[in-house]
Image (cartoon, rainbow, N blue to C red):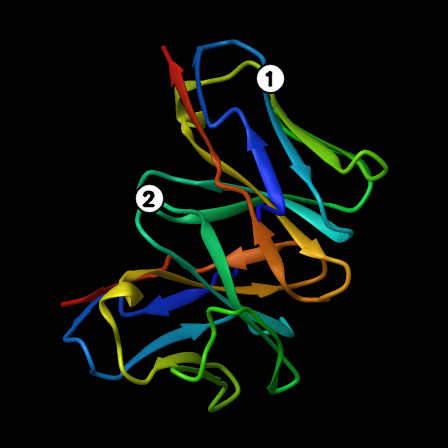
Amino acid sequence: EPEVTQTPSHQVTQMGQEVILRCVPISNHLYFYWYRQILGQKVEFLVSFYNNEISEKSEIFDDQFSVERPDGSNFTLKIRSTKLEDSAMYFCASTGAYEQYFGPGTRLTVT
Amino acid sequence: KNEVEQSPQNLTAQEGEFITINCSYSVGISALHWLQQHPGGGIVSLFMLSSGKKKHGRLIATINIQEKHSSLHITASHPRDSAVYICAVRAEDTGNQFYFGTGTSLTVIP
């Protein structure tokens, strides 16, 4: 069965550092998403991406965040200067005809 | 402001019981998703609904668009059903933005 993959599974970084979270969506999917889940809280939408551009973004997705599809397979989320409050699980997802397929997540810890 | 409300927040059931989890939402939607989040954190999509009812094994999901309400039912519950169940809606006016409920934590006791 096709799956969304994410790397790394866990990233520890110091405050102020840049991080790049990587995702490989399912190959024939067209819509891609990033979500985050702060420990103990609900999942929050960050951004959706279609046709090589952002189609929607939430208030959380400020200038510190960017997304890119640098080649035909990878989909990345960059946080330019991490803050303590960026510590969370970050999920990538892609959508086919009906359902969303979620990756296993990257746990980001900012110290 | 919570666009998506779920109830109950926590649910404990005996194995074999019939379980219902409810989701109400306040925005116009193009689709509603039921998701399952395992204790390790992974998220699995169970259903995507835009109308009516869907069934997959012991799981049934229904949606009433007029009442802005959806239910997830689990028949003959089993301890392996223990997980957090999350309702998420794709808002109609922002085509690809999703709003998530806080989840219902289900524990099924043998």
Q: For the residues tagged 2 and 1, is the chain the same?
A: no
Image position, residue B48 (x, y; %): 68, 47
Residue reaching furthest to the bottom = A70
Residue identified by numbered label 1: B75
Q: Amino acid at mark 2?
A: Gly
Image check: B23 left or right of B39? Answer: right
Q: Is residue B31 shown left or right of residue B2?
A: right
Q: Chain under label 2?
A: A
User: How far separated are the C-alphas under marks 2 and 1?
Assistant: 28 Å
| Residue A87 in the figure: left or right of residue A12 | right
Quarter assignment of residue A90:
bottom left
Residue type at the position of mark 1: Thr
Crowd band around label 1 with a 10 angstrom C-alpha radius: few (<14), some (14–19), many (20+): some
Q: Quadrant of residue A22?
A: bottom left
The front one of B42 and B90 is B90
Query: Closer to the camera: disc 2 or disc 1?
Result: 2
Q: Secondary structure at mark 2?
A: loop
Say whether residue A20 is visible.
Answer: yes
Q: Which residue is mark 2?
A: A40
Q: How many marks?
A: 2
Rendered residue at 59%/37% (across/down): B5
The image shows residue B82 at horizontal and vertical percentages of 41, 26
Q: Residue at x 30, y 44 (%)?
A: B40
Task: Tell me the residue at 36%/10% (across/down).
Answer: B110
Against A37, residue B52 (above or below) is: above
Q: Residue at x 82, y 39 (%)?
A: B65
In the image, A24 versus B87, the foreground residue is B87
User: Could you say whether the residue bearing mark 1 is in a helix, strand or loop?
Assistant: loop
